[in-house]
Image (cartoon, rainbow, N blue to C red):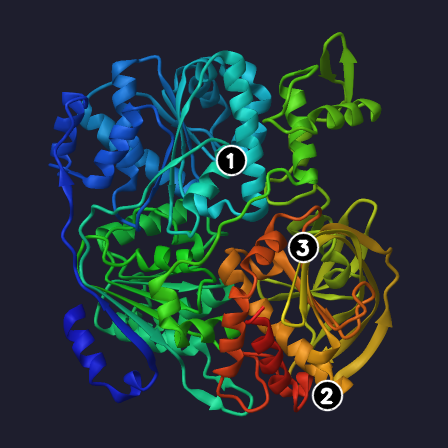
């Protein structure tokens, strides 16, 4: 049975259709083409034609034109629209024209780097020209690194390697820096939040070295669809950017289905397991030999779904190679083998985490099934684009979980299909981020007196501070690095500070293994002594939390309980930066200090959640300086509510807001903290509070302030449209937590907030 036949059968299957919340058919579209430009080298034109590319898409032609005009630009078109040629063509054309020219390619993952290098090799081979392309990352053999530095026309790497392996050793890369013409940054939507804030500073350091060596490279960036591509790209590279967002590639007919599993407990708002429903749907594809990719949100779910699907195709001898799992943690050789199997068709179904979301070439797939909403519209479209890559009919099924965000999306299809409200945000001038990279920049190249780091007015003050701390020394008119340590080694691009705790498994005597890391503000809650820590489905008991060395020592256990820490948190407003009042509500944005103190933990039985006792926690108090946005309700709004009703309503509102905000900010839920006070110490009023969960803030709270009531339109819709009676996990939280009146009060308060 082919896909079109299966689609007809699904439409006539009541057991399937009764759970379809929305079925959208996107018709096929013709492409917009352009002839090869006269400036393009004939050797490259011939190679492309041998490759089956007889004309360019309009956005590829526009990219080549802007590259020839020496303009920085960002290509924002769908998956499988040929974005790779948007940067490969101008780069190769320039190197043919000028053999000394160099290009630097940045990709977020090694898999994507390897895939892009393979595609470049193919094109270069067809041209028959000696253009040396190398990958430079942690897997590059030591013997090959010198050749890359000296002879590489195109150096393919990742931000982490650029930060710690190239920039600090720039004297070995003189040939690259003196002749650097192009910097390519692919998948820039990945670089949001802390990662993007760090990358922006890595680019600042890169451009500072380029200026020293006399080069002025041009940027070409690529991104999935986001609300603010121009602003975001400009924040990343610090220069104006032209956006190309009109897709010239043809597309096949696409079917996009929102599938909502049936309710099994209406009062509690609990639906049938999304994993169970995903297995059922994927089984239909496996049984009909339709090539399929299944995305799951955790490694555990990948393994569970893979095992069940393998059971359906197991031969008498036990072979089940047509179905494979794919996730980080697999060895690179195994991942490459799976990618080859998908391209040649020997593997018909793959179950993956988001490791296959980005543009790794896995050939033609017909169906994409997502187990749970990926968290952002951009990520959802990226995953959906893995199916129908050769312009045939394709099917995407989003299987919703009971989570509030999933339920909001499947019940508001227009929100998903008609707009992209997500803003990718970075804050490169976060003081902690800025200071760390200023140290790295000073190590790489002494700062001159009066020199500004990327135009930042506080450069002089920061350099003087580092001098007082004996990290730099002012000698003549230059600040020189004097500290012994290597600053880039202690700075992770994935965090604001270098104060993450290592989690060390000591289960095997004489063998210690690092299995993870955690930020210093979360560690006291989850890694206190005697806590039960979960890692890839395995339970570990924390034997010791060493605050001085920033290490947690854990031992594998098998117990029937889990732990939950009792956290005391207080907030103090340091500076009120902005305030807006309307309709009895005061909305404000400012700088705060959050104080954390974990005092005790409780044990709960896994199956019944029965309390099994508690224990004391003796850990130091922690302070987090950050940015916050808050809403204070005047007495005329809250009068008439009992204290219990108001508390339940505020809790419900906070729970709903926690689920909606990541949609707008394109951030992970843990990037923000949402809290409330029935009587706040600063406002003396019932107050709803949101703050960035990173030292110094990363711009999330400030963006929320600018959104005003837009967020609460969706918060109100999420709560009021939920079919539960008094609250459930999909809206305000269980009625056992928010109380009998919690949902009603949350609806009334959100109605006020949407008119702010």
Above or below, 90 relative to 33:
above
- Give the mark nearer the N terminus: 2 vs 1: 1
Q: Name the residue carrying label 2.
A: 640
Q: Do tag 2 and tag 1 residues touch (Cβ < 8 Å)?
A: no
Secondary structure, mark 1, is helix
Q: Tag 2: Cα neighbours inside 10 Å, few (<14), some, or many (≥20)?
A: few
Q: Earlier in the sequence, mark 3 or mark 2?
A: 2
| Vertical comparison of 680 with 389: above or below | below
- Front-most of residues 466 and 107: 466
- What residue is pinned by disc 1? 159
Nearest the eye: 390 or 454: 454
Front one among 648 and 136:
648
Query: Horizontal placement of 63 versus 33: left or right?
Result: right
User: Of 431 and 605, which appears nearest the observer?
Assistant: 431
Looking at the image, how many numbered discs can be counted on the residues?
3
In screen coordinates, is 317 left or right of 422?
left
Residue under label 3: 693
Residue at figure coordinates x 64%, y 84% from the top left: 745
Among numbered discs 1 and 3, the one appearing first in the sequence = 1
Residues at marks 1 and 3 touching, judged by CB atoms closer than 8 Å? no
């Amino acid at each position: 049975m082919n896909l079109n036949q299966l689609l007809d059968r699904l439409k006539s299957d009541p057991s399937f259709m009764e759970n379809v919340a929305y079925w959208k058919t996107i018709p096929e579209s013709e492409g917009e083409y352009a002839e090869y430009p006269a400036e393009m080298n004939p050797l490259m034109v011939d190679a492309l034609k041998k490759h089956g590319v007889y004309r360019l898409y309009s956005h590829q032609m526009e990219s080549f034109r802007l590259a020839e005009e020496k303009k920085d630009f960002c290509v924002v078109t769908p998956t499988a629209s040929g974005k790779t040629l948007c940067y490969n063509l101008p780069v190769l054309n320039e190197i043919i024209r000028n053999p000394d020219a160099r290009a630097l390619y940045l990709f977020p993952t090694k898999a994507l780097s390897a895939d892009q290098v393979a595609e470049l090799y193919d094109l270069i081979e067809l041209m028959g020209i000696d253009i040396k392309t190398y990958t430079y990352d942690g897997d590059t053999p030591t013997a090959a690194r010198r050749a890359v530095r000296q002879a590489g026309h195109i150096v393919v790497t990742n931000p982490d390697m650029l930060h710690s392996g190239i920039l600090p050793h720039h004297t070995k890369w003189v040939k690259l820096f003196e002749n650097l013409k192009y910097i390519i940054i692919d998948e820039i939507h990945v670089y949001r939040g802390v990662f993007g804030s760090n990358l922006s500073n890595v680019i600042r350091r890169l451009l500072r070295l380029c200026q020293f060596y006399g080069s002025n490279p041009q940027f070409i960036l690529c991104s999935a669809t986001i609300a603010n591509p121009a602003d975001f790209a400009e924040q990343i590279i610090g220069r104006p950017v032209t956006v190309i967002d009109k897709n010239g590639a043809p597309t096949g007919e696409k079917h996009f289905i929102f599938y909502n599993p049936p309710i099994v407990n209406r009062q509690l708002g609990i639906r049938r397991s999304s994993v169970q429903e995903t297995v059922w749907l994927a089984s239909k594809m496996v049984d009909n030999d339709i090539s399929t990719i299944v995305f799951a949100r955790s490694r555990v779910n990948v393994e569970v779904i893979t095992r069940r699907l393998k059971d359906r195709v197991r031969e008498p001898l036990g072979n089940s190679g047509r179905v494979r799992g794919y996730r980080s943690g697999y060895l690179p050789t195994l991942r490459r083998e799976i990618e080859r199997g998908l391209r040649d068709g020997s593997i018909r179904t793959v179950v993956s985490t988001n490791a296959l979301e980005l543009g790794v070439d896995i050939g033609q797939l017909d169906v994409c099934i997502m187990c749970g909403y990926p968290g952002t519209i951009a990520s959802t479209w990226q995953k959906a684009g893995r199916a129908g890559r050769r312009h045939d009919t394709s099917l995407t099924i989003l299987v919703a979980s009971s989570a509030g965000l999933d339920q909001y999306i499947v019940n508001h299809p227009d929100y998903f299909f008609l707009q992209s409200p997500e803003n990718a945000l970075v804050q490169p001038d976060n003081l902690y981020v800025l200071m760390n990279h200023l140290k790295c920049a000073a190590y790489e190249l002494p700062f001159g007196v009066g020199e500004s780091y990327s135009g930042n007015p506080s450069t002089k003050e920061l350099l003087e501070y580092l001098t007082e701390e004996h990290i730099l020394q002012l000698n003549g008119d230059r600040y020189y690095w004097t500290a012994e340590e290597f600053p880039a080694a202690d700075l992770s691009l994935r965090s604001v500070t270098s104060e993450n705790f290592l989690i060390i498994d000591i289960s095997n005597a004489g063998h210690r293994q690092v299995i993870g890391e955690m930020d210093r503000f979360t560690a006291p809650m989850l890694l206190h002594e005697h806590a039960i820590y979960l890692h890839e489905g395995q339970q570990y008991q924390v034997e010791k939390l060493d605050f001085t060395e920033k290490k947690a020592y854990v031992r594998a256990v098998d117990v029937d309980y889990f732990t939950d820490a009792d956290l005391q948190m207080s907030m103090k407003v340091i500076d009120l930066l902005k305030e807006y009042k309307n309709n009895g509500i005061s909305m404000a944005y400012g700088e705060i200090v959050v104080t954390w103190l974990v005092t005790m933990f409780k044990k709960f039985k896994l199956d019944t959640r029965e309390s099994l006792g508690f224990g004391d926690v003796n850990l130091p108090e922690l302070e987090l300086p950050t940015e916050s946005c808050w809403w204070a309700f005047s007495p005329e709004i809250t009068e008439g509510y009992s204290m219990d009703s108001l508390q339940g309503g505020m809790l419900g509102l906070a729970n709903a807001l926690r689920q909606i905000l990541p949609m707008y900010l394109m951030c992970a839920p843990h990037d923000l903290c949402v809290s409330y006070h029935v009587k706040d110490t600063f406002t003396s009023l019932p107050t709803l509070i949101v703050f960035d969960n990173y030292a110094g803030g990363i711009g999330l709270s400030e963006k929320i302030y600018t959104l005003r009531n837009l967020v609460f339109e969706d918060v109100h819709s999420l709560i009021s449209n939920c079919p539960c009676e008094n609250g459930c996990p999909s809206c305000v939280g269980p009625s056992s937590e928010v109380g009998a009146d919690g949902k009603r009060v949350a609806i009334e308060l959100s109605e006020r907030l949407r008119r702010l």
